[in-house]
Structures are given as C-alpha cells and as structure tokens.
Image: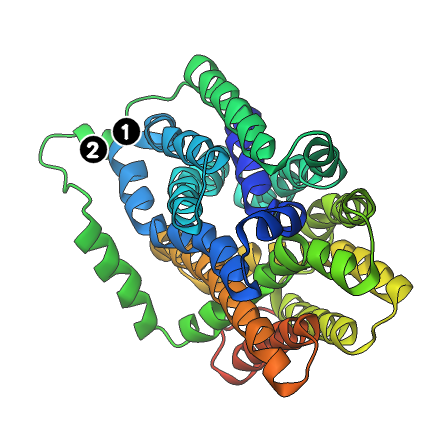
Amino acid sequence: MLLTLASAFTLSQAFRTLAAIMGPPLAAQLALTPQQLGLWAAAFHFSFGVMQLAMGVSLDLYGVRRTILMAFPMAIAGALLSSQASSYAQLMVGQMLIGTGCAPAFLVCTVFISRHFSAQRFTAISGLIMSLSSIGVLATATPLAWLIEASDWRWGFGVLAGCAMLAWGAIWWLVREPAAATADAPGADKPSALGALRGLLGLFKLPQTLGLVAYAAVAYAGFITLRGLWLGPLLVERHGFSLIQSGNVALAMTFASMASPALFGRIDPGGARRVRWLLGFAVLAALMVGTMGLVHVAWADVALAIAYGLLSGYGVLQYGYVRDAYPAHLRGRALSLFTMAMFLGISLMQWASGLAASLAPRAGVEPFSAALLTMSALLLAGALAFWRLPRAVTPA
C-alpha cells in the first residue's frame, strides 16, 4: 500500500519540477518575465504548504485513503486547466489547484510510515520513499523535453494529468485502512483547523522550534529551486544548450539525487553528529550554488548541478532530528510544522530568486547570477539560524 500511496507523491514531484524544462518554451509563448516564472513555480509550493494544516486535520478525521482521494482530483483539474491555458492568470490558477491537490501526497506517506514502521526504521523508509519518488523528477527531465520538442508544453500537462488519473485509480483500488478510531469514537474530541493551528503555534513555545523552521525552509528549497526552476533556463540562455541537452543535464542531476535520500537515511549518525552534518551540508550546498552564480562556465555549471543532486538527500536527516527533538505526543504536529515550513520555504526561495533575477539587469547583473546568489544567501541564513538559535538537546 505504501508504494501505491507513493505514486501520488511521485506525480507531486513531477509537478513541482516541471518548470525547469517547461519554463523556457512557456515563457517564450506567453512572454513571461523571470519574476512571473518564479511566481508561477512558487504558486505550487505556496498552496501545497498552506494546505498542510487542513490536510493534517483531514488525516485525523478521515484517514490516509479518503484524504488523498478527496484532494488529488484538484491536481488533475489543475493540470487539465494548465494544458489549455492562454494567459498567465489561467496558469496561476492551474498551478494553485495542482499544489492544493498534491498537498497530502507527501504527508500521507510519512503518516503511513510512522504508523506501520518502527521508530528505528522511520528515517530509512522515509529516505527510500523519497528516492523512489524521484522517478517523477526523472520524468520532467529528458522525457519531458522530448515531449515538448515533439509537440509543445501543453502536452506535458496533459500527460501528467493522465498519469495522475491512473494514480488516483490505483489508490482507490488498492489502498485500504481501518476506520480512524479517533474520528468515530463516542465522546472523542474532533480535530479542527483552529485546534491544529493552536497546536502548531504552541510548538514555538519550545526553544528548538524556530531554528528548525528556519533550516527546514531552505534545505530542500535549494535543490527544488535549482532543479525545478532555474537549471533549464540557465543552461539554455546562459550557455546555449538545446532543450534536449538541458533535459539530459536535469536527468543526470535527478539520477544523482535518487540514491541520495536513501543513502543518507542509512548512514544517519544520530545525535549531535547529525546536527553537525546538517550544518556542514547546508553550508556546502550554499557554496555550490553560489559558485554557479559567479562562475559562468558550462562544464562547471553542469558538474555542480550533478554534485548538488548527490548532496541533496542530506535533508532527510531532518526527520530523525524532529523525532529526537520533540516528545512522542508532539511529534505529529512537529512533523506537520516541519513539512509546512519546508514547502512554504520553497515558495519563498522561488519567489525571491525570481524577483532578484528580474531586478538584476537594472544593476547590470546577469539574472541567473542574481537568482543563484539569492538562493545561496538564503541557504546560509537558514544554516546560521539553526546554528545560533537554541537546538534540542541530543545525545553525543
């Protein structure tokens, strides 16, 4: 059942990364600025992140199966609308629908893992599912470039809508779970969005929360913003790559990233060493992205993108940190807050880098340099906050 649920997460990964290849032809046809392109990509993650609260309540009330079956049709509708879009406004509405429909895709997997696997296997299984879901990211590399070259960008949305329909059908057919006892038990407190919001805000009374949120907002955002937004336009416009060539680089970066979460999940050192790893890898990621912004050499940009793919799985170490940082009765809401911060952070980084790219020509700076240096600064800021703000006491 976990693999069937992961099919929706795989489609979610495809939707969140298609901008890197679809961006250049879409921007050319609809005359989009870099800022508009960044906002369009960010719209998915904004709606995805905002809806985490409602999806958490839905999971408590209706369970894993019904939550994903109710939400995912919105992603299908958004993809179909986007495939027929003739204006930027229609694209934005479609993107918001896709993000809303995909909102529970990641959460249902983590909830299922937490319910059916031991605490010792939580990080490893989460890493494995993240690696498997990278098939969706693979699909938005060379395969999507081939499809767009053979037809146009609208077919990309159409094919993904069809795949999403198949995933919905598989979940409806194969996923079963017992009725949620908390929702149906006489006298049980009914979860509510207001109650969930109060629970999340209550976490900020604990000193370790703010630093964790700051770190979570940038760690995964760096990879998704590079692979899912700027990689394709950078290679096409900075170095003159064809769409297929940029797709091949995106494919190599994705292959590199596929094994990364499972690897980091298996070698998770735990305790204080895990914290040092999280800090060190975030700084390394910032340096890699910053170098891409400063060094305008094709082979260096390609090599650094692929190397970033290999590094990207370090973010899975955060799941183990969250489990260790909070007592058992707070872990569910802590994971919800962490997930919300992660995807709202992607939205922020994509918007901020798009804004920087749009403003850069006024200062005589290349747009991609401005975007990548903005990403690097945000990664360093998140790592600095995690380092300087109070952290959970972990065993050595």
The quarter of the picture where residue 281 lies is: bottom right
Residues packed near mark 1 inside 10 Å, few (<14), some (14 to 19) or many (20 plus): some
> Which amino acid does the dot numbered 2 rest on?
Ala
Q: Nearer the viewer, residue 147 or 249?
A: 147
Instruction: Say which residue label 1 marks.
Output: 180
> Which of the two residues, 104 or 26, is positioned nearer the viewer here?
26
- The quadrant of the image that shows the C terminus is bottom right
Asked if one can make out residue 216 in the rendered structure from this viewpoint, the answer is: no
Q: Residue at x 68, y 49 (%)?
A: 261
Q: Is residue 317 left or right of residue 327?
A: right
Above or below, 169 against 126 in this view is: above
Name which residue type carries label 1: Ala
Q: Quadrant of residue 160?
A: top right
Residue in the image at 83% along x and 53% along y: 241
Q: Position of residue 289 (x, y in %)?
A: 72, 70
Closer to the camera in the image, 240 or 177: 240
Quarter where residue 240 is shown: bottom right
Q: Is residue 288 something that shows in the picture?
A: yes
Q: Position of residue 20 (x, y in %)?
A: 65, 51
Q: How many marks?
A: 2
Q: Position of residue 238 (x, y in %)?
A: 78, 65
- Find the distance from the CA under tag 1 to the CA under tag 2: 6 Å
Q: Determine contact: label 1, label 2, CB under 8 Å.
A: yes
Label 2, secondary structure: give it.
helix
> Image check: 35 left or right of 288?
left
Give residue 235's position: percent from left, percent from top. 78, 58
Packing grade of label 2 (10 A; few <14, some 14-19, many >=20) is some
- Residue 183 is tagged as 2
Q: Against 89, is 271 above or below?
A: below
